[in-house]
Image: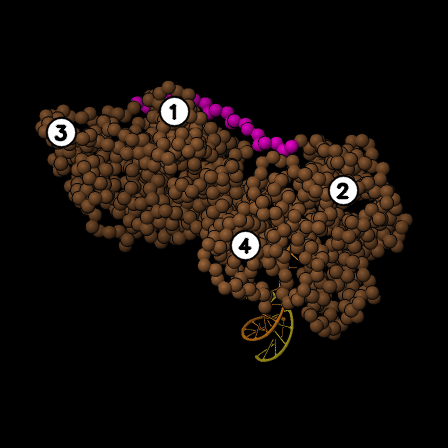
Chain colours: A brown, B orange, C yellow
Amino acid sequence: MEYFADLHIHSKYSIATSRDCNLVELTRWAALKGIRVLATGDFTHPQWASEIDEMLEETEDGLLRLKDQYIEENIDLPGGFGPREVRFILNVEISSIYKKYGSARRVHNLIFVPDRETMRRLNSRLDRIGNIRSDGRPILGLDSRDLLEITLETNSESFMVPAHIWTPWFSVLGSKSGFDSIEECFGDLTPHIFALETGLSSDPEMNRRVGSLDDYALISNSDTHSPSKLGREVNIFDGKPGYRAIREAIRSSARRAANDADEARFIGTLEFFPEEGKYHLDGHRKCSVRMDPQETEKLGKVCPVCGHALTVGVVNRVLELADSESGNRPGFAPFWRMLPLVEVIAQAMDSRPQSKKVVTVYHELLRQLGPELTILWSMDLDTISGKASPLIAEALRRVRSGDVSIQPGFDGEYGTVTLFGAGEREKFMGQESFLSAQKPASRRSMTNKSSTKKKTIKTEKTVKENSQKSEVEFNDQQMVAITTFDRPVLVQAGPGTGKTRTLTGRIARAIAAGTAEPEQIIAVTFTRKAAKEVQERLESLMPAETAQKCWVGTFHQLGRRILDHFSKEGLFEGGQSVLDKHQALDLFRQAMKAAGMKIPGGPSAMFDRISLLKQNLVPPGDSEDADLGRAYSIFQEHMLLNGALDLDDLLLRPVELLKSNPGTAEAFRGLFARHLLVDEFQDVNRAQYEMIRLLATTDGSGLFVIGDPDQAIYGFRGADRKFFLRFHDDYPSACRIGLVKNYRSTGTILKAAQQVLNDQRECEELIPQRSADSSIKIVRLPNQATEAEFISRTIDSAIGGVSFFSLDSGRAGALHKGYGFRDFAVLFRLNAVGDALEEALESSGIPFQRTKRQSPEEEAEAFDPRVEAVTLMTIHAAKGLEFPVVFIAGCEEGIIPHIPAHASSMPSQDMDEERRLLYVAMTRAADELFVTCAALRSLHGRSCELPQSHFLAEMDKSLCEFQDPLAKRKPKAPRQCNLFS
DNA sequence: CTGGGCGCGGTTTTT
DNA sequence: CCGCGCCCAG
């Protein structure tokens, strides 16, 4: 039995699709068309998946059908094919947008699965990876290869087919963001790909000019967004319908893994005239410029009207990759060109396809002759003439024999097919009796003989990602920092000046020059993440086993190590367990209860105050507040009793021990701390500073501290940049070095960021090392929802459009520089601002990743590291990172600077820290910086109108570009309110 | 000791 | 607005 299968459609849950794309209508139209197997499409969408669950039932071998209760009875076409015979195959199209080999890639892939259980498993897996709720064709920042891996892991019976492989914007071989071969895209998993979808703008003959595609079957589908267009391109199978049968039939046709026990055979495809496709030729739609590849080449791929880049179409791209003069080669499945029946009728009747009379004739014809595809593909023209106007039969004859004239499509505009020239209809009607005597050739005679030609798969092309700048090149100042060993070294390293590179370079140098044994090196950071990065860089600079002998860790890990050393010497006991903040707070509450102490501000606030005392090495007795001192003493006793240490104790106790046991301290120093390097030195608190002083020699030799007082933003947790600034007083022989060559940001960004620091700046003026430049965009929006929309639209546009919709509406591509999602960061001062952003961006379809402090259990289900996404995080969390494009959201007075509730006035040092916070945020940006603020913002359920941050006024206007859509509207009465009152 | 209700306060974060 | 922390009742 021969049957038609349309394996790529979309539901009503995809963007820009008809409301009629529901299971009932799709089934009805499939029956009218004569499509036996229809893809569900969109199964990752939760609502569509639940409709699939409720309304379909399983039938033979992995296919589904609409339950009887939903079937409409009124379809009764000749040929015995109706809605009851329509089967669904589970599938979805995924839009993968990611960077590979240094370029932005946008690839659409079809995934087929054998049962609903697999669908559910895959959905829950993809749900964790990205946003599958806002679009039936979800966008994932996932490499096609990794998506394939996940698909096959979920069920090895699943398979993937790259979709419409030649379209310029979203396909595996597309000119804008594709690859030059299937292998480049899928790497080691390429053997699992056995079929490709040709898409409307190309046909098999074009594809067969590209030898590297010889081993793939070529399938054709409608990719329709409305039910009436089902099957406009379609596959023909022979045999039993079934999931496995279809998969194996396609696979056998691909000659990748021939299967003799085929239950079905892949016959071939029905095709559009490829010229009709939206991206057939090259051109520029806005200027109505269409051209073929030769002309495009002559004009240097630039529009002759406006000078912008032309959209390079499918023919051009095929020619680029072609290695064969002709695609008409034997041994491949055949195909037949066709035109939708309404189009054929409309041309015969000299009317529009949507016109009422055409639609009436269409349905009448189906009622008399049977399903559309049967009419188009295999029905005798005589039979058709018997029931319809001979002009319709003639129109169809012309379609079948390719006797048509076509205006090719380009740059998103469909091509147009013309069957009859001026006066031809009338002429034909005159000759009609003569022509009808000549029978057209049978369609089946076009079927090619199958060939057994084999070809080995091309070896995987190896392309390396752009390797990072060599680790061994240093500028003059960096070199001094790296090679000065006879004195303590203080390095003031501005943003983007190569801080970590310098620190690790120095360690490598010390070891290479024999100045230090790796075991005598201690490198201290604030976070485990930073420690890991230092360790990894060391491993890239020297043999791994040497690098591992260096001690790299956080201050707290160092404290632990010192305590262990003193334990071994019998000088310290207890502290078996280290409590996290929560546990410590519980113990504190317990201690207060036991002591019968009532705390006015609540135990949590008191606990924080005690923590600050510990970090500042203030003994309980010296506390100004007697209650505070007493609580502190009671707490420490209680901790001692429980053999517990809190995180502050990991700094405090080692300092006490080192101070009171100079001999042991000296021994420890000699053994392990000949070289002591401290990262982010501006963030040390007193306890950390003392720890370093006690570990270093009196004159500070071997001591190397690096940081940037302009980026000190942790004052609230006891850090004080005064320790950085007074380093030279404590170590008069210290060599002070400033790193000022900034390799990260454009000159404009640097200049503006430094203006924000105002006269607070400690660092010398940064010198930009980059040439490209663009102004800072300061955008004022009506509210937080429009702020989020602005951000997502800007990203969408800079990526080059994440959907066909935005591309076809012509708003994409202007800023396109090959960015991927991971190149963007959205930064904010308050998590509450981030919450609102996250919520609003959820519906945009752009993959976002919120980087939040993570509890251990959250860490377990952390983001798949393969996924690319836009980063959302606080400014604090962004320190030390960089992104090509940065948005600073919520830049309103009261938020940046953040003015806390009930604050009557703000201490100037706090205000300065807020200033530095904006400086840190701005200097994260490499290429582009957007600053957004909302005129109306709701925070803590309260709506506020806030002016933009007064810090923005510090920036020179010439560096900025202002966008304020509000300014054009009628001004509202200014109603300013306090944020938290 | 557990649960529900109420009232208030609300940055930033690492170990 | 929402979550917590505390208090009181059972």
Neighbour class for label 3 at 10 Å: few (<14), some, many (≥20)?
some
Q: Marks 2 and 4, Cα distance to the nearest angstrom? A: 36 Å
Chain ID at mark 1? A
| Rendered position, A365 above or below A791 | above
Chain part drawn in magenta: A449-469
Q: Give the residue furthest to the top.
A: A325
- The mark that comes first in sequence, 2 or 4, is 2
- Give the residue type at disc 4: Cys
- Rendering coords of residue A881 (x, y %): 63, 44
- The reply to whether callout 1 and callout 4 are in contact (CB within 8 Å) is no
Q: Where is mark 1, residue-wise?
A: A295
- The mark that comes first in sequence, 2 or 3, is 3
Specify whether residue A307 is painted magenta. no
- The reply to whether callout 3 and callout 1 are in contact (CB within 8 Å) is no
Q: What secondary structure is the stretch in magenta mostly built from?
A: loop
**Foreground label between 3 and 4:** 4
Residue A480 can be seen, yes or no: yes
Neighbour class for label 1 at 10 Å: few (<14), some, many (≥20)?
few
